[in-house]
Amino acid sequence: TGYKYCAANINREIMRNIKHNSGLTLIELMVTLTVLATMIAFGMPQYQRMIETNRISGSINSLASDLKLARSEAAKRNRAVSICTSNDGNTCANIPNWDAGWLVFVDVNRNLFFDAAADTILSVNTGINAGFAFTNTGLTVPGALQYIPTGTLSTTSLLAAGATFRLCENINNNPIRARGININVQGRVRSATDTDASDVREDFNGNDLVCP
C-alpha cells in the first residue's frame, strides 16, 4: 500500500510539472506575439515584392515566347506569321498597348490583320496582369509585327534596325523596375539588360528604359 501511495504521489508531481512547463505565461505570450508581429512587418513587403517580380517576369516572358514561336513557325510553315495586339483574343486591335493581349497567327495575305476565313491562330494571350503598361518603340505599326519565312522581320515591320518592348509598373513608373525585350531586323529576341551599371535596363539603341 505504501508503495502504491508513493508511486501515485510521484505521478501527480510529474503531471503537475508537465502542465506547468507546457504553458505560457502572459509575459512569454506577449514577447512571442511581438516577435511574430516584427517578423510579419519586415517580411511582408519583401514577400509582396517577390510576387510583383514574378508577375513582371511572367508577363515579359510570355511575349518573348510568342515572338520566338512566330519566328520558328514562319520558317517551318514557309509562311508569314504576324503578331498583333488584341482586346478580345479573336481580332487584331492594332493599338500600341500590348497589355490587353495579342494574337500570333499565320498571315496568308501578309497584311498584319487576322482574317478568320484564311488565317490560322497559333497562340492567344488574353492580357497581362493589371497594374502594368506594355508598349513598344521602333515598330512601323506600334500594334503589330511580322516574321517572314526566312525567320527575319518583314521590311515593313521596323522603323530602323530594331525595336523594344517595354513593361512598366503603373504605380510609380520606376525605370529600375522596368523590363524589356529587344528585337533586331534578323528577328532575334533578347531580354533587355543593364550594361552600364546604371540599375536600369537598356533598349535596342543602348538607352535606359523610360517609363511610362
Image (cartoon, rainbow, N blue to C red):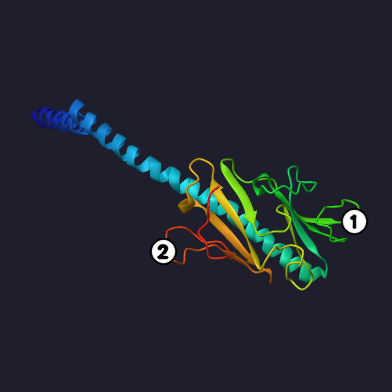
- Percent coordinates x, y for residue 146 in the rendering: 76, 62
Residue 89 lies left or right of residue 118; in this view the side is: left
Q: Relative to 129, does residue 202 appear above or below in the rendering?
A: below
Name the residue at 39% across, 40% down.
44
Q: Which residue is mark 2?
A: 197
Measured Cα–Cα span from mark 1 to mark 2:
48 Å
Q: Residue at x 77, y 73 (%)?
A: 150
Asked whether, in this view, residue 84 is left or right of residue 38, the answer is right
Mark 1 or mark 2: which comes first in sequence? 1
> Tag on residue 118?
1
Which residue is situated farthest in the front direction here?
160
Instruction: Specify few, some or many for label 1: CA neighbours under 10 Å numbering under 14, 14-19, or 20 or more.
Output: few
Residue 39 as seen in the image, left or right of residue 64: left
Q: Quadrant of residue 203?
A: bottom right
Residue 143 at x, y percent in the picture: 72, 52
Q: How many marks?
A: 2
Relative to 58, does residue 30 appear above or below in the rendering?
above
Tell me the quarter of the image containing the N terminus.
top left
Residue 186 on image: x %, y %: 69, 72
Q: Secondary structure at mark 2?
A: loop
In the rendered image, residue 53, in percent from the top left (x then y), is placed at: 49, 50
Q: Secondary structure at mark 1?
A: loop
Q: Amino acid at mark 2?
A: Ala
Give the amino acid type for the residue marked by disc 1 in the picture. Ala
